[in-house]
Image (cartoon, helix red, strand yellow):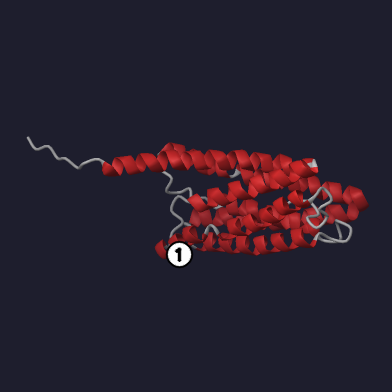
Amino acid sequence: MIMASLGYSSHGVCSYLAGVAGNLFAFVLFVSPFPTFRRIIGNKSTEQFSGLPYIYSLLNCLIVLWYGLPWVTQGGVLLVATVNSVGAVFQLTYVIIFIIYSENSRKLKMSSFLIAVFCALALVIYLSLEFFDGSARRNFVGYLSIASLISMFASPLFIINLVIKTKSVEFMPFYLSLATFLMSISFFTYGMLLHDFFIYLPNGIGTILGIVQLILYMYYSSKSMDLSRLPLIASYR
């Protein structure tokens, strides 16, 4: 998912392994919403789940996929293109399911977001091919990839706000938070080992947000367990 040639592990085995680990955890992140969408399909409702993280993820995967293709990066970056093509398919599937089971008002809103994502991708492709060449094209798409990654990692802020408001982790799936953290810290380590700003900056932000989510999950889930252990005593007067 990151704008780097994972195949060129010039800074040693450690950086290469960190990059491979990031790809593996990215796949885990792609499949982690399965329980959420089983619930949505089973209840035929999106309830209070947010569809924005999947919109952000779709946009990110498409932009970084474009970065990994040979039209942008000389020779192409096969591993980056592959993982993001798989990610794009997963995210598009999630968004479609979310639209199907949303209320009419949210259905229209999510459909508009989906159209906007593909319009944004078409604009990026047009601008990069028409106005940029060589390294300039790579840098243009690379900086856009950073922006999309930061947006994707910032989307959990909506969920964090909901958890704090409701004092419940019901709508913040644990495996999604864990996978985000593991993927982010893997690519953050990879970027630091390569001294690559494009990699470690957005993933450093993702690591921090992942830690916040996991802390909130432990805090509010433990509070819920404590409340469930309280004896149910009714006082009749």
Q: Name the residue nearer the viewer: 34 or 63.
A: 34
| Left or right side of 26 for 102 | left
Residue at the (59%, 58%) spot, across then down = 28
Amino acid marked by disc 1? Ile
User: Residue extending furthest right?
Assistant: 133
Residue 154 higher or lower than 67, as above or below = above
Q: Is residue 97 visible?
A: yes
Quarter of the image where one finds residue 164: top left
Q: Describe residue 197's horizontal placement relative to residue 74 as left or right.
A: left
Q: As rendered, which of 147 and 87 lies closer to the eye? A: 87
Residue at horizontal 62 percent and vertical 53 percent from the top? 55
Position of the N terminus by quadrant: bottom right
- Residue 58's spot in the image, x, y percent? 65, 56
Q: Give residue 146's quadrant in the image.
A: top right
Residue 90 x/y as whole percent: 61, 63
Quadrant location of the C terminus in the rendered image = top left
Residue at far front of view:
13
Which residue is more in the foreground, 152 or 18?
18
What is the quadrant of residue 234 in the picture? top left
Residue 156 in the image, given as x and y percentages of width and height: 56, 44
Looking at the image, can residue 117 be seen? no
Residue 24 is left or right of residue 47, and the answer is right
Relative to residue 171, is residue 63 drawn left or right?
right
x then y, percent, for residue 74: 89, 58
Mark 1 secondary-structure assignment: helix
